[in-house]
Image (cartoon, rainbow, N blue to C red):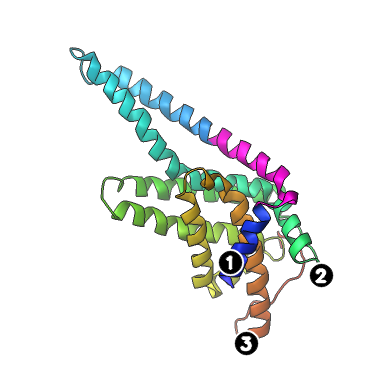
C-alpha cells in the first residue's frame, strides 16, 4: 500500500498538472529559507559584534563569523520541516484537488479546510516542529544520535501533519486524528519517507508537494481499508464533507 502510494505521489509531483504549483512551492520554500537565513545571520552577527572573541586577534573573529555562517546551513535543515509544513498547508487544496481528480476521478472531491483553521493548524504545527527540531539540533555533535533524533522526530511530526491535512478535506480533524491513530504504523512509515526526503539536499525542496500527494493517496487507501474492516471503533470513510466538521 505505502510503496504504491509513494510511487504515485512521486509521479504526481513530476507531472504536467503539478508544474505550476511546483514552481510556486519551490519559490515560496526558498524565500522562507532565505528569510530564516537572513534573520539568523543578523542575530549571530549582532551577538558576535557585541561579544567579540578576541580584540587582539581579529582573524579569530573572522573565523568565528565564518563558522557561524557555515553552521547556519546545518541549522536550516532543522527549520526545513516547519517551513515545508507551512508551504504544504498553503498549497494543500490545489495539490490535493489535482491528485483526487487525476487518480481518483470516480470519488467525490474533498472540501478545503476553512482558511482560518488551516492557518492556525499550520502555525501550531510549525511552532511545534521548530521546538522539537531545535531540541534535536542540540544533539548535533553526538554522532549517530543526531541523525536518529532528527529522523525519528520528523517521521512522527511530518506523518501526523501531512496525513491530517489530507484527511481534513474529507472528515473533521478529530476524526482524521482517530484514523491516523488506528493506522499509526503505516502513517509513521509514510512520515519516515517524507523525513528521508528532507535529508536529501535540493530534492528536499519538493517535500511539501510530495508529502501532500503521498498522504492524499494514503488517506484514500486507509479509508477504504477502515470501511472494509469495520468492527468496533472503526472510522467510517467520509467521501466528502467540510473539513471543519
Q: Is residue 195 visible?
A: yes
Measured as percent of width and height from the top left, residue 72 is found at 39, 34
In the rendered image, residue 17 lying in the magenta stretch gets the answer yes
Total numbered labels: 3
Which stretch did the figure color magenta? 14-32
Residue under pointer 3: 231
Residue under pointer 2: 106
For label 3, the SS is loop
Q: Could you tell me how far apart the alpha carbons at marks 3 and 1 are, in whole angstroms?
A: 18 Å
For label 2, the SS is loop
Mark 2 is surrounded, within 10 Å at the Cα level, by few (under 14), some (14 to 19) or many (20 or more) other residues, namely: few
Q: Which mark is residue 134?
A: none
Q: Is residue 94 left or right of residue 121?
A: right
Q: Is residue 223 above or below residue 43?
A: below
Measured as percent of width and height from the top left, residue 12 is found at 68, 56
Q: Is residue 121 above or below residue 159?
A: above
Residue under pointer 1: 177
Amino acid at each position: 500500500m505505502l510503496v504504491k502510494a509513494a510511487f504515485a505521489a512521486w509521479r504526481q509531483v513530476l507531472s504536467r498538472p503539478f508544474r505550476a504549483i511546483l514552481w510556486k512551492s519551490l519559490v515560496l520554500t526558498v524565500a522562507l529559507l532565505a528569510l530564516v537565513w537572513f534573520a539568523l545571520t543578523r542575530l549571530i552577527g549582532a551577538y558576535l559584534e557585541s561579544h567579540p572573541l578576541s580584540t587582539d586577534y581579529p582573524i579569530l573573529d573572522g573565523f568565528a563569523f565564518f563558522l557561524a555562517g557555515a553552521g547556519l546551513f546545518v541549522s536550516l535543515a532543522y527549520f526545513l520541516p516547519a517551513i515545508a509544513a507551512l508551504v504544504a498547508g498553503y498549497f494543500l487544496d490545489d495539490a490535493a484537488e489535482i491528485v483526487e481528480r487525476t487518480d481518483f476521478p470516480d470519488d467525490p472531491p474533498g472540501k478545503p479546510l476553512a482558511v482560518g483553521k488551516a492557518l492556525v493548524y499550520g502555525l501550531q504545527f510549525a511552532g511545534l516542529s521548530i521546538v522539537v527540531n531545535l531540541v534535536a539540533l542540540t544533539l548535533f555533535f553526538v554522532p549517530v544520535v543526531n541523525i536518529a533524533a532528527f529522523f525519528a522526530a520528523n517521521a512522527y511530526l511530518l506523518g501526523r501533519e501531512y496525513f491530517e491535512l489530507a484527511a481534513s478535506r474529507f472528515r473533521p480533524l478529530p476524526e482524521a486524528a482517530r484514523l491516523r491513530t488506528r493506522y499509526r504504523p503505516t502513517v509513521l512509515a509514510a512520515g519516515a519517507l517524507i523525513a528521508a526526503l528532507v535529508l536529501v539536499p535540493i530534492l528536499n525542496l519538493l517535500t511539501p508537494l510530495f508529502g501532500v500527494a503521498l498522504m492524499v493517496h494514503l488517506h484514500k487507501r486507509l479509508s477504504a481499508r477502515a470501511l472494509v474492516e469495520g468492527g468496533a471503533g472503526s472510522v467510517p470513510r467520509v467521501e466528502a464533507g467540510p473539513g471543519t466538521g
